[in-house]
């Protein structure tokens, strides 16, 4: 009986340790310098102090909403045509920069998102695409990311 109780106590402590290790502190989180494309350093500091959830959300969205890929997988893609067809009026872009960065800033480009299918945008550079994940999948992944910080 004592062995069973002792074993249960040790297992409980181990499980508590694992669950606490999974959560990150916003103070230890690395916010990308590319956030300056969207918000100022002063705004980053303000959000970090007053609304860290929003800062984590912006950081995650910036790099994960519209990603550049070079290999398609078997999936339910919705062909959306050329990326440049969605270029905001008055804005220019260099395709090589997008390919090198591996993402498209969703705060500058207004790329549509389907509820259940991946939206696929072709780049002129052969073999590269921009993909926007379905809204359902996006929300699951964003929420999982936010949960790492207990939001």
Image (tube, grey):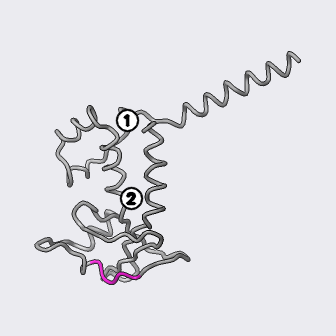
Q: State the image coordinates of residue 148 (x, y, percent, origin top left).
A: 47, 41
Q: Residue at x 38, y 65 (%)?
A: 67
Left/right placement of residue 109 relative to residue 137 reads: left
Q: Residue at x 38, y 76 (%)?
A: 129
Q: Label 1 vs label 2: CA separation?
A: 18 Å
Q: Main secondary structure of the magenta part?
A: strand
Q: Residue at x 37, y 69 (%)?
A: 113
**Disc 2 target residue:** 64
Q: Secondary structure at mark 2?
A: helix
Q: Residue at x 53, y 75 (%)?
A: 75
Asked whether 52 or 28 is in front, the reply is: 52
In terms of image quadrants, where is residue 94? bottom left
Mark 1 touches mark 2? (CB < 8 Å): no
Q: State the image coordinates of residue 12 (x, y, percent, origin top left).
A: 69, 26
Q: State the image coordinates of residue 78 (x, y, percent, origin top left).
A: 43, 80
Answer with mark 1 or mark 2, whichever residue precedes in sequence.
1
Asked whether 12 or 114 is in front, the reply is: 114
In terms of image quadrants, where is residue 151? top left
Is 44 drawn above or below residue 6 in the view shown? below
**Magenta stretch: includes residue 64:** no
Q: State the image coordinates of residue 18 (x, y, percent, origin top left).
A: 61, 33
Residue furthest front as drawn: 115
Q: Secondary structure at mark 1?
A: helix
Q: Which residues are magenta?
A: 79-83
Is 76 drawn above or below residue 140 in the view shown? below
Is 110 drawn above or below residue 40 in the view shown? below
Residue furthest left as drawn: 90
Left/right placement of residue 49 relative to residue 151 reads: left
Please give the label number shown on residue 26: 1
Quadrant of the snapshot with the N terminus: top right
Q: Residues within 10 Å of mark 1 (few under 14, many from 20)?
A: some
């Amino acid at each position: 009986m004592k062995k069973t109780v002792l074993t249960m106590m040790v297992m409980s402590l181990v499980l508590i340790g694992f669950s606490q290790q999974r959560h990150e502190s916003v103070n230890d989180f690395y916010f990308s310098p590319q956030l300056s494309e969207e918000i100022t350093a002063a705004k980053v500091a303000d959000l970090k102090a007053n609304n860290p959830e929003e800062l984590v959300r912006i950081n995650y969205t910036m790099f994960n909403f519209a990603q550049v890929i070079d290999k398609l997988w078997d999936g339910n893609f919705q062909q959306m045509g050329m990326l440049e067809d969605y270029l905001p009026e008055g804005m220019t872009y260099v395709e090589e920069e997008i390919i090198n960065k591996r993402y498209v800033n969703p705060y500058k480009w207004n790329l549509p998102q389907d509820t259940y299918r991946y939206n696929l945008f072709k780049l002129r550079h052969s073999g590269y695409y921009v993909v926007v994940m379905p809204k359902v999948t996006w929300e699951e992944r964003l929420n999982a990311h936010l949960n790492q910080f207990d939001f």
